[in-house]
Amino acid sequence: MNALPDAASASAPEPVADRAARARGGICLLEGDLPLFFGGSLSDVRVAWRMVGPPDAPVVAALGGISAGRYVTSEGEIKGWWAGIVGDGMALDTTRFRVLGIDFLGGSGETTGPRPGQADFPSISAYDQAEVLRRLLERLGITHLDAIIGASYGGMVALAFAERLPERVGQIVSISAADRPHPMATAWRSVQRAIVRYAISRGEGPEGLRLARALAMATYRSPREFAERFSMPPSLIDGRYTFPVERYLLARGDAYAGSYCPEAFLCLSESIDLHRVEPERIGVPVTLVAVKEDQLVPLEDMRTLRDRLAGPARLFEISSLYGHDAFLKEEAALRAIFAEVLGSTGGAK
């Protein structure tokens, strides 16, 4: 579980010693019912949020994959999930923008989500995430976002927000996220969820999550990277051969299982595969970033999305050894794209 230092019960700003004027966050209680897209509702949703940047700067929401949370940039001993991209003088510059991060609804952070052993948490849509973001913005007194920059699942949420709430955002950037999942990607994730469900049924949820994450890592990166890093011969350990790539994948699985709730993984992995938006109803300016080596979101799907969008749309195609994980690694490419996209943004509203 990702218990983090600012898990307070109120939504009031909280200072940080070395950035008192530039970082604030907390837990915001959204009182009342939240009707859900796939049926049912949640009551009194708690939303964990964090914002870094000059108090009067334009606001950009930065949303990542299902394991990303409110700490977008690093603060003290806490490493942000986009620490290589967001920060002072970086590709998404926190001296120019207020950057807002949230813990996703249904995830493993401090926002409302399933707890270990909870099997009845409802299905969550990217539209539900967009509505939670809207309500949070209202509570924070922010009437308009200059942009939402979303990568992977966060890009799906950005597209959903643009479809449903176009008056609330100036533009969106969707990195490695299309209007719907590719069936091959759904196939891989379906097997991952089956592994976790089976493990939970045997009282071994964390072990199932470990294996599911290991499998997922094989889909995030490119075959070329694995060929370059893991072509060494296996080692004989405890009477059996162990392969270098096997050790890497299981180590990544160990790290993930130690910090994430299996039931939350099931919820948000399913949410990815339930994702559908209508591009013809999205009229705000959209910038798409596709990675040619991405195994999960094929380049052709991003091109099709660009052609179907109702409003101004452009597509940047980049090449990366890191495949789907390029949004975490390709600082230079994203710096150039963000400079072009955000260079003419207006002031805070």
Image (tube, rainbow, N blue to C red):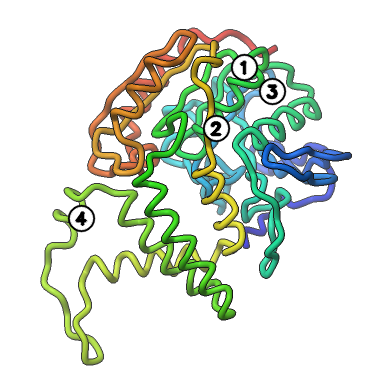
Dot 1 or dot 3: first in sequence order is 3
Residue at which label 1 appears: 169
Circle 1 SS class: loop
- Of discs 1 and 3, which sits in the foreground? 1
User: Relative to residue 158, is residue 296 drawn left or right?
Assistant: left
Q: Residues within 10 Å of mark 1 (few under 14, many from 20)?
A: many
Q: Secondary structure at mark 2?
A: strand
Q: Which residue is mark 2?
A: 62
Residue at 34% of width from left, 46% of height from top? Answer: 184
CA gap, disc 4 and disc 1: 39 Å
Percent position of residue 93, x then y: 49, 26
Residue at (32% x, 21% y) in the render: 316
Between discs 1 and 2, the one toward the N terminus: 2
Task: Indicate which disc, 2 or 3, sits on the residue closer to the N terminus.
Answer: 3
Image coords of residue 265 (percent x, y): 55, 57
Give the labeled residue for mark 4: 226
Q: Image height check: is 263 above or below 240?
A: above
Q: Is residue 258 left or right of residue 298?
A: right
Q: Amino acid at mark 1?
A: Val
Mark 1 or mark 2, whichever is nearer to me? 1
Give the labeled residue for mark 3: 55
